[in-house]
Image: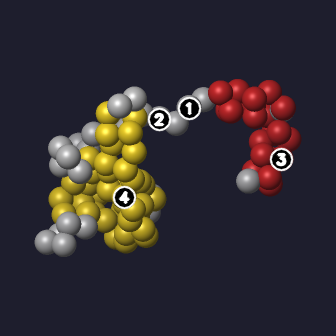
Amino acid sequence: LRQVLCRLRERFGELIVVVASLVGAPSPQPVQVTTSLQGMPRAIVWRDHIREVKLVYETWRERRRWWSLPVERDYYRLETDDGLVRVVFREVQTD
């Protein structure tokens, strides 16, 4: 991370790091997911493109309360056939 920050500063100046720190994470986008019989993601459909899942790196479940609304999600860090690593999640209560 330090090396990347140094390269950004060298290329774009100190202000770029400050501006980047103010930008929040993108909001989740809805996707369709097909799963195996075990419930693991096999393919995702996003923006009218079907991407097969090549590898699931890790899975985890988060349970927490968010402003008195319970959140329970199953997360999957996976790699798709286009070589990108993505994180998708499933709302446990609404599937």
Distance between the alpha carbons at the discs numbered 2 and 4? 20 Å
Distance between the alpha carbons at the discs numbered 3 and 4? 35 Å
Return the mark for residue 13. Answer: none
Distance between the alpha carbons at the discs numbered 1 and 4? 22 Å
Instruction: Give the vertical position of 19 relative to 31 (above or below).
Output: above
Q: Earlier in the sequence, mark 1 or mark 3?
A: 3
Q: Earlier in the sequence, mark 2 or mark 4?
A: 2
Q: Secondary structure at mark 4?
A: strand
Instruction: Give the vertical position of 64 relative to 55 (above or below).
Output: above
Out of 55 and 60, give the one closest to the viewer. 60
Residue at mark 4: 61
The amino acid marked with disc number 1 is Gly
Q: Earlier in the sequence, mark 2 or mark 3?
A: 3
Contact check, label 3 and label 4, Cβ < 8 Å: no
* Residue 65 is at least partly visible in this image: yes
Please name the residue shown 35% across and 31% down the image: 68
Please name the residue shown 38% across and 65% down the image: 59
Residue at mark 1: 24
Q: Secondary structure at mark 3?
A: helix
Contact check, label 2 and label 1, Cβ < 8 Å: yes
Distance between the alpha carbons at the discs numbered 2 and 3? 24 Å
Name which quarter of the figure residue 70 lies in.
Answer: top left
Q: Earlier in the sequence, mark 3 or mark 4?
A: 3
Q: Around disc 3, counting alpha carbons within 10 Å, would you say few (fewer than 14), some (14 to 19), or many (20 or more)?
A: few
Where residue 92 sits: x, y (%)?
23, 51
